[in-house]
Amino acid sequence: MLRVVVCVSGGGTNLQAILDCAANGTLPGVEIVRVIANNPGVYALERAKAAGVEGLCISPKEFGTREEFNDALLAAVSEAQPDLIVLAGFLVAIPPRMVAAYPNRIINIHPSLIPSFCGKGYYGLKVHEAALARGVKVSGATVHFVDEGMDSGPIILQRAVAVQDGDTPQSLQRRIMEEAEWQILPEAIRLIAQGRVQVGTDRTTRITERQAQ
Ligand code: GRF
């Protein structure tokens, strides 16, 4: 069983996509064991509760220093003994100690085709505002492993979504969530659970064929 901890900061629609797949049997061998939010009262925690998954909040506001928050976050994650940590709309810089403790075992969903519109300052609607301002005809989403950088780890899956005339940042965000994020994040977890994602020394990934059962 692949034990998964999901970290969230907001509405939790990506978490919901994972929970739905776990509930409908399309994520065999995967158990969501804990949901961790960095803000109290986010709807993602309601989604976890409705699915019977333990949810807790580790808020930076509860700690005197960033280091104390980082310690508490890492403790809350490791206490759940995860095999995989999924950042699903999690707007917290992952402490280097946590990246080092879980090499190629933390994945993130980013709402663009990395390396476009990613890195410092590119999150939420800002990503789509930048894409529309640049006039790209295609955007999409990326699932990647988390390394010590921001949105810079090995890419696992990507899915393209056409930009439509008249798109607003909101309409583009919604379409990318529906057509890309909510599909490729569960798929990446599925592939990892099946042991089919290999990271090369060149920090690119290869998806291997399904082993005959
Ligand atoms: C989504 O656009 C996701 O790509 C980004 O955060 C936004 C909110 O995600 N990382 P969610 O609804 O909280 O899953």
Image (tube, helix red, strand yellow):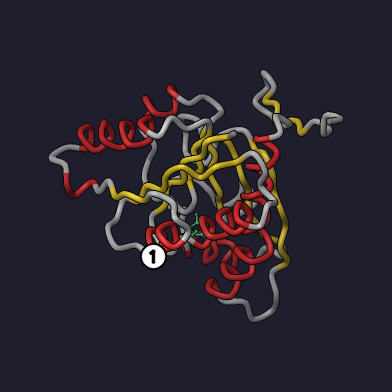
Residue 195 location (% of width, % of height): 70, 29
Q: Position of residue 166 (x, y in %)?
A: 64, 81
Count the marks: 1
Query: Which residue is farthest left?
Result: 64
Quadrant hosting residue 198: top right
The kind of secondary structure element at disc 1 is: helix
The N terminus - image quarter: top right
Q: Quadrant of residue 66?
A: top left
Question: Where is residue 169 shown, x and y percent of the image?
Answer: 54, 71
Along the horizontal axis of the image, is 84 left or right of 120?
Answer: right
| Residue that label 1 marks | 43
Question: Which residue is at the front of the view, 176 or 183?
Answer: 183
Compared to 101, does 62 lie above or below? below
Q: Is residue 42 above or below residue 88?
A: below
Looking at the figure, which quarter contains the C terminus? top right
Mark 1, Cα crowd under 10 Å, few <14 / some 14-19 / many 20+, is: some
**Residue pictured at 38% horizontal, 35% vertical:** 77
- Mark 1 Cβ and ligand 1 under 8 Å apart: no
Residue in the foreground of this view, choosing between 48 and 204? 48
Depth check, front residue: 164 or 201: 201
Q: Outermost residue toward the right?
A: 212
Left or right of 103, for residue 193: right
Q: Residue furthest front?
A: 52
Which image quadrant for residue 136? bottom right
Q: Nearer the viewer, residue 126 or 80?
A: 80
Q: Residue at x 43, y 23 (%)?
A: 101
Task: Identify residue type, mark 1.
Answer: Tyr
Residue 187: image location, x then y, percent? 68, 47
